[in-house]
Amino acid sequence: MPSVPRISRCAARLAACITYDFVLITYRMQITRSGFANLRAAPPTEEMDPMHDETRVSGQQDRSAGLTARLANVLAGGMGSGGRYEHRDLVIAKGKGAHVEDANGKRYIDYMLAFGPLILGHAPRVLSEAVAQSLETGIMFGAACESELLLAEEVVSSFPCVDKVRFTNSGTEAVQSALRLARAYTGRDKILKFEGHFHGWADNIFISVKPVAHMGLASHPKAVLMTPGQPKSVIDDIVIATWNDFPGIEQIMSRHGSEIAAIILEPCPTNNGFLEVAPGFLEKLRALASAYGSVLIFDEVVSGFRMALGGGQELYATVPDLCTFGKAFAGGLPIAGFGGRDDIMSLLVDNAVSHLGTYNSGALSCAGALAVLRELKRDDQAVLKHIHRLGKELIGGFNQVFQETGAPLCAAGPGAVVSVYGSPTVPKTYRDVLSHNKELLARIHRALLHRGVWSFARGTFMISAAHDEDDIQETIQMMKRVLTEDINGAGAW
Ligand SMILES: Cc1ncc(COP(=O)(O)O)c(C=O)c1O
């Protein structure tokens, strides 16, 4: 006869399974019936609508509103990328340095930096000059050029893991190429990725980036598709793990290790707020990947040339087998890349493994990226030092404001990226972030935007070489005014 505690344990486990399956089924139904964007909830009323802006200028002066309406007539969803949803009514006329101006002539301090690439700010002279020169001498040739060579040499000397490199046009493509190489190298199909990490929008890896609930046990999360239109079969080749949970990953690898072609991760994850890696975690993963013969890939699309020149692998002194990079690498031009150990990259020799692309290594993009990298390396990396110093100042200022106002928020991050979390404690995993007050973060984002400070809706602030002390102090003051004047006190949180 089973004991009473055992029966109640079984009942609790059964209840947990039923609840989990219910969440999963409901989530899947939401995805298949209504499309990804509609997962956000019912259409907002005017008061709830985060886009509703009472400060908006009226009548003919509101050029932005007119352009937004026209965009909605011709551009699907009125925007060029789903990532722009939270600021879909913003039409930018021009940018210079750390500031942009919208179509109404309103100025913003820009901490979006076009989702990260603008490490030197808007229209930096070194980049404009390099691009102007390339416009005179030819923008692409479909063949090698000297700027490609010089750029490749700079990348090889920047990343500890890179013996050889190839260029792509986006981070998404760079990740796809690295995954293909890992599969070719190992003869295996499965990829281990972390819940909450983002590696581009391609079907086979846009998985478990932002699950809406706890999907499976933390020690063995379930893989979840992120958009209607992804074939269900892609799930079969993905194994999901929890960031910073090494015992969980050891267990997963003991079950699946011989099938895992690659372990891919963001060494400095920022796509759900900055989730700092636990001390020793990357070193242990490095050893585990080697023990099972899996390729370790660091996705440095955000961290490369921003957190440190050599990204997370330099910062945490752990050398992966392959890495991907993009964004800050080219200061806003459409070029990214992947690189790594010679024996893996050599699979590309004589097209044994395919890597193709009409626009790869275009002369204009290579010349621009080269100018950016030289600027970042100049004067003992003065630009990155400046960025980190300002970022730390912003974090300190924000935390003081949160303390003074009693707002249940905190700020942290490596400096070059600043995260404001919807909780007084810094999260360690994606599941910690799930329970944060996202509504409060969204209201702050919107209120800051009204006051001329443009950050990511998720609470992220990216710093560039063009930001200065005045921008940082103004931003801290605006955060204080938002919390004390726009969002009225404890009742609001
Ligand atoms: C870590 C990471 N990897 C890959 C990508 C995809 O890069 P892209 O948008 O250039 O395709 C992103 C984009 O935000 C990213 O943050």
Image (spheres, helix red, strand yellow):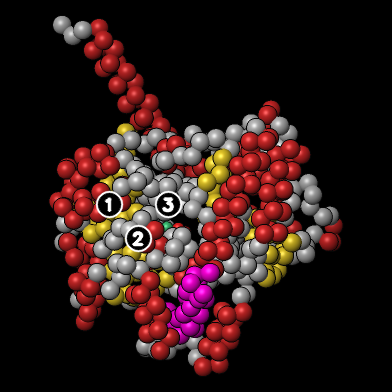
The residue that appears at 61% across and 51% down in the rendered structure is 394
Q: Which of marks 3 and 1 is in front?
A: 1
Question: Disc 2 or 3, which lies upstream in sequence?
Answer: 3
Report the disc number at residue 269: 3
Number of residues whose C-alpha sits closer than 10 Å to that of mark 2, classed few (under 14), some (14–19) or many (20 or more)? many
Q: In which quarter of the image is ligand 1?
A: bottom left
Q: What element carries label 2?
A: helix
* Depth order, front residue of 254/321: 321
**Closer to the eye: label 2 or 3:** 2
x 46%, y 70%: residue: 329
Residue 403, how many percent across, how many down?
63, 36
CA distance separating discs 2 and 3: 13 Å
Q: Residues within 10 Å of mark 3 (few under 14, many from 20)?
A: many
Q: What element carries label 1?
A: helix
Q: Quadrant of the C terminus?
A: top right
Say which mark, if any, is on residue 283: 1
Question: What type of secondary structure mainly makes up the magenta span?
Answer: helix
Q: Is residue 274 visible?
A: yes
Q: Does the residue labelled 3 lie within 8 Å of ligand 1?
A: yes
Q: Name the residue that disc number 2 marks.
A: 313
Q: Which stretch is magenta?
A: 358-382
Specify whether residue 198 is painted magenta. Answer: no
Instruction: Please report the residue visible at 82 percent of the width from the left and 55 percent of the height from the top.
Output: 57
Amino acid type at circle 1 is: Glu
Q: How far apart are marks 3 and 1 (CA)?
A: 16 Å
Mark 2 vs 3: CB contact within 8 A: no
Can residue 365 be seen here? The reply is: no
Residue pictured at 25% horizontal, 48% vertical: 284
Which amino acid does the dot numbered 2 rest on?
Gln
Q: Above or below — where is 410 with respect to 323?
A: above
Give the Cα separation between the discs numbered 2 and 1: 10 Å
* Dot placed on the residue nearer the N-terminal end, 2 or 1: 1
